[in-house]
Image (tube, rainbow, N blue to C red):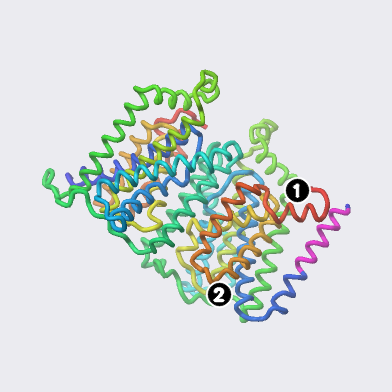
Amino acid sequence: MNDILIYGAVTSSVYAMLAVGFTLMFGVARTLNLAHGSFYALGAYGTYLMTTSFKLSLTVAAVLAVLIVTALGVAMERMLIRPLRGVGLAVPMMTLALALVVEQVLFLGFGSEYRNVPSFIAASVIVGGVDVSGQRLLTVAVNGCVLACLWVFVHRTRQGSAILALSQDREAAQYVGIPVDRVYALVMGISAALAATAGVLTAPFLTVQPGMGLMPMIKALSIVIVGGLGSVRGSIAAALLLGYAETIVAYELSTAWTELVSLVAVFMTLVLRPAGLFGIRAR
Amino acid sequence: MSKAYANLAGATGFMAVMIVLPLVVRGRYFVGVLTLGLIYGIWAASWDFMSGLTGRENFGHALFIGAGAYTAGFLNTIWMANPWWSLPAAACVAVVFSLAVGIPTLRLSGPYFSLATLAAAAIMQRLTLIFWERTGGEDGLQGIAPLLKSPLELYYLCLFSLVAVVAILLAISASPWGMILRAIGGDELACRASGHNTTLYKVAAFAIGAAPAGLGGALYAHHQLQVGPQLLSVFVSVSVITMAYVGGIGSMYGAAIGAILLTVLTELLRGAGEWRLLVYSTVLVLMLFFRPHGLVAPLWQALRGGSE
């Protein structure tokens, strides 16, 4: 019972990090970023490259990796997404193509074999009678803190108000002088940073290989649909829901069936309540 | 009228070239590559029918391709059915999949359809790996029987299938039916306001596009004599989309020719085998940026003089 609680929290917190970034991008900038999983993969590979080839200490490597991925995200928004915004579905197409470019570059650079990234905390801890690796606990703690900071940032700062305003009414926000493009770039940066952080933290205990970004992104998409497109609250709630549902299925049935959980959840959401748990725009 | 003649002449010329090509340039290998190009042509044209006309981008065409190929594989290796049963069965299975994905998502506006197609194909690929006892996992299903005795016969079967598929899709798109699909692409709300059940049209178009994709999957299975989970990957979907973009969205014949050209051209780059997928995704990025209307169809329209 306790192991379900703890492992479920780890899974949920990672899903939440990915889903919140994705939904922010959609809710604020109306941008469907299908390269979101690439940020996750790049975070992990960045840490790997900097600890092995450049011999940096793990913490420095991790921070640098997140910063570099954030910069990449902002650059991508500026140069590749912004010019295509408003041209039908060119943006999702472009981001999907970019995701494959990233995957192929990682494949050509590192090969398809699994890479090992060292843990931040090697020791394992016994919590409530369950033996958990320190890295997993650290993941939950850091993800929780980052999401809390994000909440404070969005609800308590001027920049955050600009983000909220843009998500409510783009034109009105423009009229009161909010620099739309700059806020979009900011949101893209935040979204990339969240995904990269999740990648850096989970790299030690999940597989690091070129295609690693796809499945977490598919899960994030599912969570965002279940929670309601564009709703941060909904994404967190749905991340907990799906994270725990998958863990329960993994423990009670078999790990083989976990992939079906999100599929069933998405299907039910689309049939019963397309707006999602917390979505406002119904159709 | 002259445009119709020009189109007829173009189609005849294309047919002539495709019929003669494998006889002039001999060699099993080259015929195999051309056959693959024709199969990709079927996939690209069928993607273009739904997504090009209605503007609803399907990011998971690989779902139908894989469903068709695995249907052929299962029928042939487990139930030992006659290979010819694969073709209709694969098309039917693909249609069933398209209805399962299309009915819940196409009634909604917003990105649900695109996300669901992407997710459905990716999850199916995971499932083939997880249930490896039945699907053969990473190795897939081996030892599928060939459909016809010689590769050349299979080539002509694929050529016939491609021409038939493109002709049927073009006929539908030129009919009042296709007009409504284009109208949905232009302004769905206005189309609904004038009394058309747009959801029905979209779901039907999706199913019509899925059937040839499944058929192509079965042809692929009997061409390669094996199927693997990489047929369900995002790369297949994106390769198909790239081909349709190079051909010119909404033209169908452009998508088919784009597919043949891209397949043959990337085979020439075989030395750089690993780079193939990178080339495809980069071509798509560049096309989106610099030539969003494609190359093949605009070129043909310029040659013929004037657009539709």
The chain holding disc 2 is B
Q: Which corner quadrant holds the N terminus of chain A?
A: top left
Q: Count the numbered circles shown.
A: 2
Q: Is B205 displayed left or right of A59 in the figure?
A: right
Percent position of residue A115, x then y: 31, 60
Residue B138 or residue A31, whichever sits in front: A31
Can residue A20 be seen at all in this image of the molecule? yes
Percent position of residue A42, x then y: 38, 50
Identify the mark at residue B175; answer none if there is no mark: 1
Magenta stretch bounds: B2-15
Q: Residue at x 48, y 66 (%)?
A: B274
Q: Quadrant of residue A221?
A: top left
Q: Amino acid at mark 2?
A: Asn
Taking the magenta stretch, the answer to whether it contains residue B12 is yes
Residue A173 or residue A60, whichever sits in front: A60
Secondary structure found at label 2: loop
Percent position of residue B227, x then y: 49, 68
